[in-house]
C-alpha cells in the first residue's frame, strides 16, 4: 500500500461498504448511482475523520502526547471523532469550538461530552490561535499536547484518503473478478471543505495511475464553505505536501482539481431547501441518512447536476458519503 511506511493505528471499520443505489437511480432517471459508506466507519457513529485519525493518533502516540487538541464549529464532526479517538487510546482531549456554548447539548456536542472531552468556547477568535494557547497552558501544567489542525487536514491526516482511494480501487477490482462485470466510476462526488479528503483522493489516483484497476474518471468536490479558487489553492498545496510526506515526488496545481462552488447557499452550516430536499430524497429512496451541513449540500448539488444533464446516460457516479449523521441531531426539525 502507498501508506504502508506510515505509523497507523486501527480505528475505522474498513473497508467501508460500496453499494449500488438502485431505487434512487430509477427515480432520478440519470446516471447509475453508487455510494461509498464512510458514514459507517465507526468512532462515535462514523465519518471521514476516522480515516485521518488512524494516522494522526499514531503520530501523536509516537510523540508521547497525552492530550489531543483540535477545533471546529459547535457541531463539528471532526471534533467529535477526535474526542472519541482520544478516549479509545487513553488520551485526554481539549476541544476549541467556535461561538458560545449553546443552550442545549445535543448532536456532536452531546457525544463530545460523553467521551470526556473538555470544551473551550472561543467566540470568533481564530481557531489556530486559540488551539496554540490551550497547548501552551497544558505544557505549562506539565502535559504533552498534540494539536490536530482544523478538519484533520494536514499531510498526515490526508494520507487516510490516499489509503481510501486504494481501498476503493481494490473493491472495484474485487467486484469485477467476482461478477465479470466491469466496475469503473466515471465520477466521484462528495463534500469538500478543509481539503484533506479531496487532496488525499487525488494523490491516491495519481500515485496509482499506472496500476491495474486505476481510476480515470473525474473527482468532483462540492464545496461546502469556500469559493472554488480558494479551495483549489488549498487542495494543490495539501496534495503536494501529502505526496511529499509519502515520498511520491508528485506536484499538484490548482487546475488539477475539480471543484463546484454553486451550492454554498447561506454559508457554512446554514440549512436551506437544497439540503432539506437532498436529505428527504436519499432517505426516502434508500433509507440512508445524510447530514444537513456536508453530505446534504453535496448530494443536493449532485441532484441538481443530474437534473441539468451534467452526466451522460450509462455513466457510473459514486457518491462518497463522508458522514455527519450525529450532526443531524444538532439541527432537529430545521433539517426536515
Ligand atoms: C469534515 C467533513 C467533510 C469535509 O472533509 P474535508 O476533508 O474537510 O474536505 C465532509 N463531510 C463531513 C460529514 C465532514 O465531517
Image (spheres, rainbow, N blue to C red):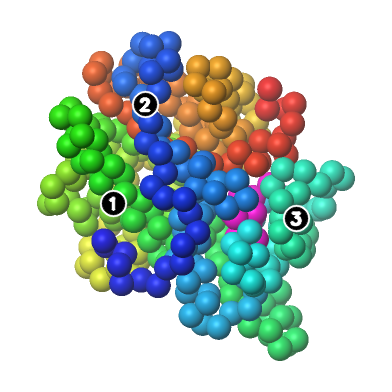
Name the secondary structure under disc 2: strand
- Is residue 290 placed above or below 241 in the rendered structure? above
Disc 3 + disc 1, Cβ < 8 Å: no
Of the pair 135 and 268, the residue shown nearer to us: 135
Instruction: Look at the picture and state if 159 lies above or below 188.
Output: below
Specify which label sits upstream in the sequence, 1 or 2: 2
| Residue at 34%, 56% in the rendered image | 163
Taking the spot 24% from the left edge, 18% from the top edge, the residue there is 314
Separation of marks 3 and 1 at Cα, in angstroms: 34 Å
Q: Which residues are magenta?
A: 74-83
From mark 2 to mark 3, how far is it between C-alphas?
Answer: 35 Å
Residue hosting label 3? 114
Where disc 3 sits, the SS reads: helix
Task: Give the image location of residue 220, x and y in percent.
Answer: 36, 38
- Can you give x and y, in whole percent of width and height, for residue 180 in the image? 15, 29
Q: Which is more N-terminal, label 1 or label 3?
A: 3
- The quarter holding residue 36 reads top left
Residue assigned mark 1: 166
16 lies left or right of 263 = left
Give the residue pinned by disc 2: 20
Q: Could you say which quadrant of the image residue 20 lies in?
A: top left
> For the residues marked 1 and 2, what is the alpha-carbon distance in whole angstroms?
19 Å
Question: What predominant SS class does the magenta segment belong to?
Answer: helix
Q: Quadrant of the N terminus?
A: bottom left
Amino acid at each position: 500500500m502507498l501508506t504502508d511506511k506510515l505509523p497507523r493505528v486501527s480505528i475505522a471499520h474498513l473497508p467501508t461498504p460500496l453499494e449500488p443505489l438502485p431505487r434512487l437511480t430509477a427515480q432520478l432517471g440519470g446516471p447509475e448511482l453508487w455510494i461509498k459508506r464512510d458514514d459507517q466507519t465507526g468512532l462515535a457513529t462514523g465519518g471521514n475523520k476516522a480515516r485521518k485519525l488512524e494516522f494522526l493518533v499514531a503520530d501523536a502516540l509516537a510523540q508521547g502526547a497525552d492530550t489531543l487538541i483540535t477545533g471546529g464549529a459547535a457541531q463539528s464532526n471532526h471534533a467529535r471523532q477526535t474526542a472519541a479517538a482520544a478516549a479509545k487510546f487513553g488520551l485526554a482531549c481539549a476541544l476549541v469550538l467556535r461561538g458560545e456554548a449553546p443552550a442545549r447539548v445535543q448532536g456532536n456536542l452531546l457525544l463530545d461530552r460523553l467521551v470526556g472531552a473538555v470544551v473551550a468556547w472561543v467566540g470568533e477568535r481564530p481557531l489556530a490561535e486559540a488551539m496554540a494557547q490551550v497547548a501552551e497552558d497544558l505544557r505549562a501544567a506539565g502535559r504533552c499536547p498534540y494539536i490536530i489542525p482544523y478538519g484533520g487536514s494536514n499531510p498526515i491526516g490526508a494520507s487516510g484518503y490516499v489509503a481510501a482511494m486504494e481501498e476503493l480501487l481494490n473493491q472495484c477490482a474485487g467486484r469485477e473478478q467476482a461478477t465479470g462485470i466491469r466496475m469503473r466510476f466515471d465520477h466521484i462526488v462528495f463534500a469538500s471543505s478543509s481539503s484533506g479528503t479531496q487532496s488525499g483522493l487525488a494523490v491516491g489516483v495519481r500515485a496509482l495511475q499506472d496500476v491495474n484497476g486505476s481510476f480515470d474518471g473525474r473527482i468532483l468536490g462540492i464545496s461546502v464553505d469556500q469559493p472554488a479558487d480558494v479551495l483549489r489553492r488549498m487542495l494543490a498545496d495539501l496534495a503536494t505536501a501529502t505526496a511529499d510526506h509519502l515520498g511520491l515526488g508528485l506536484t499538484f496545481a490548482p487546475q488539477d482539481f475539480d471543484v463546484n462552488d454553486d451550492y454554498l447557499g447561506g454559508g457554512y452550516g446554514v440549512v436551506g431547501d437544497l439540503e432539506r430536499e437532498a436529505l428527504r430524497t436519499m432517505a426516502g429512496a434508500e433509507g440512508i441518512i445524510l447530514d444537513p451541513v456536508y453530505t446534504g449540500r453535496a448530494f443536493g448539488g449532485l441532484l441538481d447536476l443530474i437534473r441539468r444533464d451534467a452526466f451522460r446516460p450509462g455513466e457510473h457516479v459514486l457518491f462518497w458519503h463522508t458522514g455527519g449523521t450525529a450532526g443531524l441531531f444538532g439541527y432537529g426539525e430545521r433539517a426536515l
